[in-house]
Image (cartoon, rainbow, N blue to C red):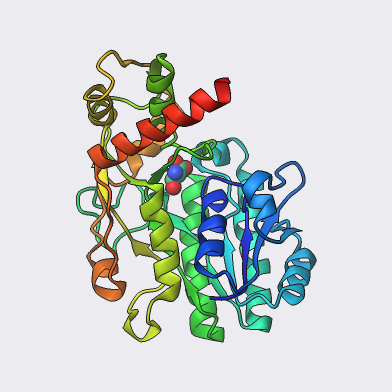
């Protein structure tokens, strides 16, 4: 990787991945792709080039790729699961028409492409415990439908045209920098904000609902390592299960309480999010990622909780001044 275009650079993953890539590849052009209304600001704006690139506009993608001699595209534009249930056609447009726009440019210009998949690519008929790498994928949400189609289309472009497509199935991602929006796993970020602000957290997911989760530094490492992996070792491409921790709301609440003893939570279950969560794995088996490209996470629930609370205290205190 040298010259990289990040589409969706101001979102939850993009805002951190863009800065990480600029640190790792200082000689290259790491281009922050954005859409109007979501322009880069601060560090993201000042530390490198930016370009207006709407994933549904094939011409804008092609122009940015040509201008910066892009060799790798991170396709991070997506509507998350709960929002995609509200706007299914928009989700299809962004996730599928956007992807094919990118893959076509990549085919012509020889770019590698990373498009994340998700725990959302699984459904009710998938084995929920230790979900295998290769298993039933019959999701019931629009988000899941687009993620399975993304995996298939990305593999298709690899087999048919030799486009270097690679991907991981992200768990719910937890970070203190940029909020996610409209996801089923967002509660696991919001619970930390509530605890640090001293507010009661109203949990939309029921007690006992296990889902895979991951701290952002591990997710960023995965996104870089998979694209840097030795291609000859990859038996899979789109997409690898990756895992680091699996928890239910009461588990993350207990971890927070070990550090903030007066943290409060009550349940008010959102039926849309709960139905999605119930259809997803309890925990994924990530042994193929470990064997094929050396995946290994660094954070567990307690390590992440300590780091989240420390950073949020700093952030929320600075914002209050
Ligand atoms: N975090 C996503 C969501 O909840 C899943 O990949 O929609």
User: Where in the figure is residue 148, as x and y percent of width and height?
Assistant: 46, 59
Q: Classify residue 114 as left or right of residue 225.
A: right
Choose top left, top right, bottom left or bottom right for residue 57. bottom right
Task: Name the quarter where the C terminus is drawn.
Answer: top right
Report the residue at 51% width, 36% height from top. Answer: 82
Is residue 236 placed above or below 95 in the rendered structure? Answer: below
Figure label count: 0
User: Where in the figure is residue 293, as x and y percent of width and height?
Assistant: 31, 73
Is residue 172 placed above or below 23 in the rendered structure? Answer: above
Q: Classify residue 77 as left or right of residue 284.
A: right
Is residue 194 placed above or below 138 in the rendered structure? Answer: above
Q: Classify residue 183 as left or right of residue 100.
A: left
> Is residue 138 shown to the viewer in this render?
no
Report the residue at 69% width, 48% height from top. Answer: 40
112 vs 18, nearest the viewer: 18
242 vs 313, nearest the viewer: 313
185 vs 27, nearest the viewer: 27
Report the residue at 53% width, 45% height from top. Answer: 12
Report the residue at 72% width, 46% height from top. Answer: 39
Name the quadrant where ligand 1 sits.
top left
> Is residue 186 shown to the viewer in this render?
yes
User: Where in the figure is residue 303, as x and y percent of width and height?
Assistant: 26, 41
180 vs 209, nearest the viewer: 180
């Amino acid at each position: 990787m040298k010259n990289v275009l990040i589409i969706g650079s101001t979102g939850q993953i993009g805002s951190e991945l863009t800065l990480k890539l600029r640190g790792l590849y200082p000689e290259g052009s790491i281009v922050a792709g954005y859409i109007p209304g979501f322009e880069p600001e601060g560090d993201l704006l000042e530390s490198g080039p930016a370009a207006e690139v709407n994933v549904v506009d094939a011409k804008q993608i092609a122009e940015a790729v040509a201008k910066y001699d892009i060799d790798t595209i991170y396709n991070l534009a997506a509507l998350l699961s709960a929002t995609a249930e509200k706007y299914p056609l928009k989700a299809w447009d962004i996730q599928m028409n956007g992807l094919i726009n990118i893959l076509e440019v990549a085919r012509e210009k020889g770019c590698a492409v990373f498009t994340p998949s998700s725990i959302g690519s699984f459904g009710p008929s998938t084995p929920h415990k230790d979900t295998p790498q290769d298993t039933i994928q019959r999701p019931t949400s629009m988000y899941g439908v687009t993620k399975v189609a993304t995996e298939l289309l990305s593999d298709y472009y690899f087999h048919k045209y030799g486009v270097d497509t690679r991907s991981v199935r992200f768990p719910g991602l937890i970070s203190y920098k940029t909020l996610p929006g409209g996801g089923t796993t967002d509660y696991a970020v919001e619970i930390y904000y509530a605890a640090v602000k001293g507010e009661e957290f109203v949990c939309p997911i029921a007690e006992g609902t296990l889902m895979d989760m991951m701290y952002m530094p591990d997710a960023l490492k995965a996104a870089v390592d998979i694209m840097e992996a030795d291609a000859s070792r990859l038996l899979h491409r789109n997409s690898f299960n990756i895992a680091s921790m699996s928890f239910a709301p009461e588990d993350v609440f207990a971890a927070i309480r070990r550090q903030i003893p007066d943290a409060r939570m009550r349940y008010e279950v959102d039926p849309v999010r709960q139905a999605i969560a119930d259809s997803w794995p309890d925990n994924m088996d990530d042994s193929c990622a470990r064997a094929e490209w050396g995946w290994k996470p660094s954070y567990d629930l307690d390590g992440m909780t300590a780091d989240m609370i420390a950073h949020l205290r700093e952030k929320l205190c600075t914002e209050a001044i």
